Image: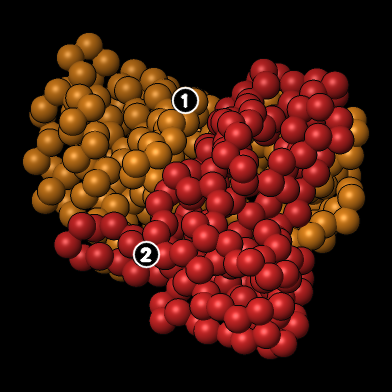
Amino acid sequence: MNEYLNQFKGKTINERIVKDCQNYLLEEKLKVNQKNPNEVCLVHVEDPKTKEIISIGGSIPSDLILDQLGFFLQEHFRIPVGGDVITPSVFIAEDGVSHDFKIISANPPAGFNAPAGIKGGRVKIGQGSTPPVRTDFDIETPFVTPPESLTVDVTPPIYDNILGQIQFFTIQQAGGSGTISEIGFFVQWRANVPSVNKNFMLAHDLVSPTVSFIINQTITVNWTWQL
Amino acid sequence: MYYDNKTKRIRSDLILNNFGEWLKGLFTFTNAVLVSVSMTDIVGTPIGVGIYPPTASVIPYNNQFGLRIRIGSGSIIARSDFKMTTDFVNPPESLQSTILAKSTYTSGTGKITGISTGFSPTGGAGTIREAGLSTILGRTAVGNQSTVLITHDAISPPVGFLAGQQIVVTYTWQL
């Protein structure tokens, strides 16, 4: 995997390289997990002026879609009772606090997707190296300097109805230096009690080869979910 | 689930475009702007479905919700499907839905499993070659709802049945 991705170092990033790398990562993943849905992500650092790839890595095939998405889907795959709330403590926010959700929303909307503030997909990078487990709720070791220490909002996802893929990405300008070895996909949803918006992690991947960056370089994460 | 090593694609059973659009909506970042996705209901009508409502006056998809299971005798499936290829003639197997018990997600294995109820006793004879999951979704007007198909699987070998028998369908999602 490292050999394939490393061939792109020094080249100018373009859509073709991103697509080739994503397809490669997906094929490597399917060799290990022959199932869908599946997800892979590509991380690269580029020079903000020349767009030259300085460092590049991808999610290793053993990464995971987490329990939090499984429990969320479970509550949809049923005949619900109005105002259903998921059992408390199933969902653990980025800060380690347990919450429950209203999956079925009454009028006015009061569910996990209720109005008030921001919602939806976000990405966080980190420098941990412990293999992810399905019960993870945050990345292992966040960076210290913002913005790489924070969650970053994803671009509007695109659904490819031929390939059955959901694709999105994030871009951030590094505030410090470091080496990316893990990455997490989060959604911000509204907890039930107390009614607050929190980030909940749905996927956690290790990155190989690790991706190094220094201040002011551009960090890009491309994520693909294969249905 | 069948993986084709030549085409590098999952073949034969499919998570449909309707589910992909829904998941895309959930993954979309928004700051008090309506996130709406386009789906096709069970009769082929395009519908707009609100995922993240910007205000309390906009009704989200989960104002109404409920999963159903469907069976049929057709054998051709594609991601763009929105209904069974060939429905049966006699009820209850001809009915477009039957009630599911609550699905169960198992932590650690990443599997969601569920089972159908209601296809009993069968009203006629037939051969099951396809099955799918459909769900009721709320639409933006209060009280309005649509049913959309989210998976469509070819069944092999085909499963024959006679009148008066019981059909049970179980499904598993592997995350």
| Vertical side of B25 occupied by A93: above or below | below
- Quarter of the N terminus of chain B within the rendering: bottom left
Looking at the rendered structure, the kind of residue marked 2 is Ser
Image x and y of residue A159, in percent? 44, 35
Looking at the rendered structure, the kind of residue marked 1 is Thr
Q: Nearer the viewer, residue A83 or B48?
A: B48
Which chain wears orange?
A
Quadrant location of residue B41?
Answer: top right
How far separated are the C-alphas under marks 2 and 1?
32 Å
Image x and y of residue B68, in percent? 69, 60
| Vertical side of B71 occupied by B121: above or below | below
Which chain wears red?
B
Q: Nearer the viewer, residue A75 or A55?
A: A75
Asked which colour scheme the image uses, the reply is by chain
Disc on res. A155: 1
Quadrant location of residue B119?
Answer: bottom right
Q: Nearer the viewer, mark 2 or mark 1?
A: 2
